[in-house]
Image (tube, rainbow, N blue to C red):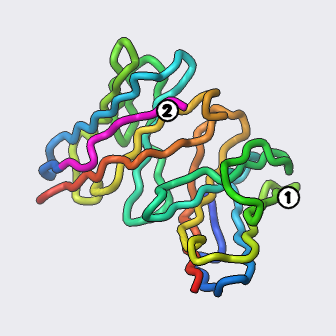
Amino acid sequence: DAKTTQPPSMDCAEGRAANLPCNHSTISGNEYVYWYRQIHSQGPQYIIHGLKNNETNEMASLIITEDRKSSTLILPHATLRDTAVYYCIVRGDRSNYQLIWGAGTKLIIKP
Amino acid sequence: KAGVTQTPRYLIKTRGQQVTLSCSPISGHRSVSWYQQTPGQGLQFLFEYFSETQRNKGNFPGRFSGRQFSNSRSEMNVSTLELGDSALYLCASSLGHREETQYFGPGTRLLVL
């Protein structure tokens, strides 16, 4: 299975952009990059996903490098409510399209 | 649309008992996946059901089983509970095409004493 590598923790000041990196060097051509977050052991919340192109929605932007070996999730104006564990997941036929979870990045937004 | 709902939200059982957890997917979603989350192992895939059939299965013992009904609601059952089964059990639903995004419920927190 394609695996991802994320820093275990990051801090960000409230109101600033939070940039969360993810390495997925073994990703294959038909595998998507998904981002979820989990707040206080609630159910994971879907954020965004992409294949090749950069994506943006009301929550975040996803920047995928041209070689697709890494990506960055951007929360443009972080708030205290964005404090959570963020998971980067590669999903495709090699994982039977199931979500194979790593340890994620604990993002702490500081006032 | 209402989101994924799971019942009960909290449960306490003793070793050796069995437990049944329920998941109601988002309306129109036909696929339901179950995950277990523990502090030591993180989030792990249990199984996925689509149109009342198990389509995928993770690496869990046979004590963990599930089923899906014609209305896409799903249940999972754990028999002969062990202390290590204490976990947050999460259910996720999607439309059914394998590449569709999965949306999660709030989870059922199971404590085995």
Tell me which corner region of the image, top left, top right, bottom left or bottom right, holds residue A59: top left
Provide residue B1's location: percent of width, then percent of height: 62, 54
Q: Main secondary structure of the magenta part?
A: loop
Q: In the rendered image, which residue does mark 2 sit on?
A: A90
Provide residue A76's location: percent of width, then percent of height: 24, 39
Asked if one can make out residue A72 in the rendered structure from this viewpoint, the answer is yes
At label 2, which amino acid type do we have? Val
User: Along the line of sight, which residue is nearer the eye, A69 or A72?
Assistant: A69
Marks 1, 2: nearer the viewer: 2
At label 1, which amino acid type do we have? Phe
Mark 1 on the same chain as mark 2: no
With A98 as the anchor, is A11 left or right in this view? left
Q: Which residue is located at x 48 percent, y 54 percent?
A: A44
Label 1 SS: loop
Quadrant where the image shows the N terminus of chain A: top right
Q: In the rendered image, which residue does mark 1 sit on?
A: B69
Region rendered in magenta: A1-10
Provide residue A15's location: percent of width, then percent of height: 15, 48
Q: Which residue is located at x 52 percent, y 61 percent?
A: B37
